[in-house]
Amino acid sequence: MTVLYDYWRSSASYRVRIALGLAGMDWTSVSVDLTKGEQTEPAHLTRNPQGLVPAIELDGKCFTQSLAILEYLDETRDLNLLPGDAAERANIRALAHAVAIDIHPICNLRVAKHAVAASEGAITMEGWMQAFIGPGLQALEAMVDAGDYCHGSSVTLADLCLVPQLYNAQRWKVDLTGMPKLTRIGAHLESLPAFAAAHPDKTPH
């Protein structure tokens, strides 16, 4: 049985839910409520010593880190998330990393909460998120292709990173009017069954 230790609004978990859907897999979702601190409880730290989600029990092993999980699923379930030659794959990874490594960590809930607390309220949660998500996505707008996907003519690793970040952007009222390519790509991807089924509103919480 595949078990995903998940949180409905976690961008990293959202990516993995999309990949599981693309793979046509059945899985059980176990909620780890980040707002209640359940990620720091001993049972979860046994699964993931970093105290993060997702963690996934899959193929008799337990995996952490969403990008590592995505590449494992890609390699073992033939998802073709990294198609093409070495240069194309490097470009796809650059797009994915622009979100998952550059935007996401600084907008992680625990980071943003620390900034708000340390500033004694001078920084708001919404202001912090807008300050980093907006410029990060604006740079990505210049990097992606002009079609219905971040790169090429099929779903890649970059698309699995983009959609959850667009969800966060909308949640924090980031102005996306100057990002027509990203909004078009996002709208197309959200119409695909695996993406639609993975949406936070469809996830138990």
Image (cartoon, rainbow, N blue to C red):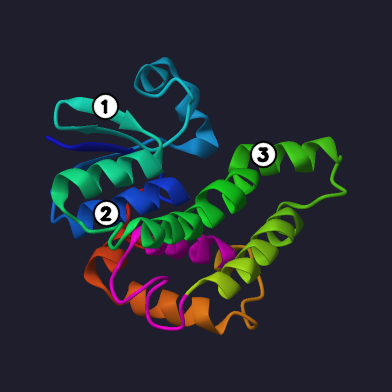
Corner quadrant of residue 119:
top right
Where in the figure is residue 55, as x and y percent of width and height? 34, 33
Query: What residue did someone put label 1 on?
Result: 62
Question: In the rendered structure, does residue 84 fall within the stretch colored magenta?
Answer: no
The answer to whether 124 is drawn above or below residue 170 in the figure is above
Q: Secondary structure at mark 1?
A: strand
Q: Which of marks 2 and 3 precedes in the sequence?
A: 2
Q: Residue at x 26, y 41 (%)?
A: 72
Do the CB atoms of the residues marked 3 and 2 lie less than 8 Å apart? no
Start-end of magenta stretch = 145-169
Query: What residue did someone put label 2 on?
Result: 19
Q: Secondary structure at mark 3?
A: helix
Identify residue type, mark 2.
Answer: Ala
Where in the figure is residue 124, as x and y percent of width and height? 77, 52
Query: What residue did someone put label 3 on?
Result: 111
Do the CB atoms of the residues marked 3 and 1 lie less than 8 Å apart? no
Tell me the CA gap for discs 1 and 2.
Answer: 16 Å
Q: Residue at x 66, y 39 (%)?
A: 111
The answer to whether 148 is drawn above or below residue 80 in the figure is below
Disc 3 or disc 2, which is closer to the eye?
A: 2
